[in-house]
Image: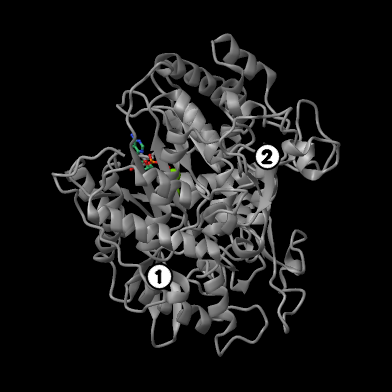
Amino acid sequence: MGLLTEGSPLSWEETKKLASHVREHGISQFINLYKRLRDRQGDVLKWGDEVEYIIVKFFDDKKEAKVSLRAQEILSVLNERELADPNGVKSLWRPEYGAYMIEGTPGKPYGGLLAHFNIVEANMKHRREEASQLLKPDEVIMSLTSFPRLGSENFTDPPTKPTPNEGATRSLFFPDEAIFPGHPRFKTLSRNIRQRRGEKVAINIPIYKDKNTKIPVDDSYKYSKAALPDHVYMDAMGFGMGCCCLQLTFQACNISEARTLYDQLTPLCPIMLAFSAASPLHRGFVTDVDCRWNIISSSVDCRTEEERGLKPLKENKFVIKKSRYDSIDSYLSEQGEKYNNIPLLYNEEDYKKLRENGIDHLLAQHIAHLFIRDTVSLFSEKVNQNDEEDSDHFENIQSTNWQTMRFKPPPPNSTIGWRVEFRPCEVQLTDFENAAIVCFVVLLTRVILSYQLNFLIPISEVDENMQKAQKRNAAREEKFWFRKDITTHISPPEANECCKKGTMNCEPKDCDMFGLMTINEIINGKEGEFPGLIPLINSYLSGMDVDADTHCTIQQYLKFIQRRASGEILTTASWIRNFVTKHPEYKQDSKVTERINYDLLKTIKDIQQGNKSCPELLGYSTMSKTKENIPNALFKDC
Ligand code: ADP
Ligand code: MG
Ligand code: MG
């Protein structure tokens, strides 16, 4: 997203009345855009990462750490630099949901040279340094998925109080002041999601039950019927959207390649979620999950009780199975079609309109399905649009369907092509780890396209994997549905879904298509059954000519991925869990006290700055040869 333009948000009542206006024009805008751009060809690989950070402030005298609500101040300086020299800056900075969050991306996307993999980490380092220069001496930016005591007493600086009876969020724990104040979008979304739903959002995450854990976990159940006694209860958009993540966007050479990449990366979403797990602590408690996903999903769940299936349906209403933040519901490529085994909800008229305008079934149902969601943020300046040229109504719905993958059409009047965004990963503590994950995923896309690999499994199994991925220690212990036969393109009915579950009589050869695999087997391979993602990447790279520094860097990244997948080193989530449960002040009661929080964040600060080694998290060799620029001599194709 570019710099957010200022605007005047409409009230929920006004927004609600315009829901069908946004839907109608949004779909027309997509149709016009599609007609203009469907045949666009010849775009080259470009790609880039997005890293989100939390600004933490330490109080060394009290041994406390809080989120610092200074994002707006810091961003205004960073954005001024960008406005002064839009093409010259090395990094771009954007606001995020929290008043304590900032998001950084490279100044320009990377391209198709292998040497680009060697500048990712240096750019991430540069971003960290650039933002750090604007911090006060006791502040630090951290690429930390969840702030452990978010929503606990006194978690902000300056101090704030939640306002359960007024304001946008009405949370018992999360004050409106912790929402980014510099643009109305964030508060408006919070208010409208609550109003559309008809009540506050309700997030219940199972507590990690330790020896002295008390149930009920706290007094929440006295104040809210929605609070479950053996869960950590959270009631605000900020608990989810106030988490940080790591995302990637790739440009494809044309729409068809974008559809292939969208589909092929889908089964990898739960795998990479489990692999990158980094958020076991929420609202001051140790929970029984390792990832943020279900928390964000519930934190923006705008479905009414009827839509959630809790009340009899009124006329023209549907039960909607998922929140607008969740895993995707359908594949987009022809090859994927046969694996679309969950019923897709959409408005028949929207679908028909798309079809009548020459859009094929798979894409039409994808777009129509996005548009089952109402707009939850509308600005008066944007209501009336020219559907031939504008795409704001389309983007309005597209950008508030927060899914594991996003299929991005070219923006109007730009040189940008069809793109795909990979959105499941949790952000890691160090630039090294984030760069390793980014390079690993981008290399996988190259391997998929070059070897024409096929990772497709029924989409219902991807959903099942998403839930498994979030469990405590899933990266080491869980088994995931995965395709073993990635070089053939046999699909249902031959590869009948029933086979792997053994519920029907099938030929054993069909049953060989999918299996249950650990993260280790998927990434490192399983003798006789699955080659492994890293060996595939290595085989792809072995045919390439690459400079020594880039080669060294990529190998460091791949080794790190291998070690983490094998369990030789810990996931961020496991490492955080261990830190808390071994802390002298921890009383086996699942509570993250101020002191534990402070010590944990101080340790993270030392690790991310390279002042403390942490072999159990990073292994022993994390020295890449990353550098800021690509030497002119290196122009080898990726
Ligand atoms: P979002 O839709 O999440 O707001 P952005 O537009 O901010 O995404 O871009 C996300 C990433 O896409 C950034 O890392 C950026 O460098 C990268 N990017 C920019 N232009 C292109 C392009 N033409 N192709 C692929 N990625 C691009
Ligand atoms: Mg973001
Ligand atoms: Mg993004």
Tag 1 secondary structure = strand
Colour pattern: one colour
Q: Are marks 2 and 1 in contact (CB under 8 Å)?
A: no
Residue shown at 18%/44% (left/top)? Answer: 634
Q: Is residue 462 above or below residue 214?
A: above
Mark 2 residue CB less than 8 A from any atom of ligand 1 = no
Nearer to us in this view, 300 or 473: 473
Residue shown at 38%/85% (left/top)? Answer: 60
Mark 2 burial class by Cα count in 10 Å: few <14, some 14-19, many 20+:
many
* Distance of label 2 from label 1 (alpha carbons): 47 Å
Tag 2 secondary structure = loop
Residue 393 appears in the picture as rendered: yes
User: In the displayed image of the protein, which residue is found farthest to the front?
Assistant: 528
Residue type at numbered disc 2? Met
In the image, taking residue 573 as reference, residue 205 lies left or right, namely: right
| Residue 31: assigned label | none
In the image, taking residue 92 as reference, residue 310 lies left or right, namely: right
Mark 1 residue CB less than 8 A from any atom of ligand 2 = no
Say which quadrant the C terminus sits in. Answer: top left
Corner quadrant of residue 415? top left
Q: Residue under label 1, please give it.
A: 56
| Residue 513: assigned label | 2
Residue 161 appears in the picture as rendered: no
User: In the displayed image of the protein, which residue is found farthest to the left?
Assistant: 632
Mark 1 burial class by Cα count in 10 Å: few <14, some 14-19, many 20+:
many
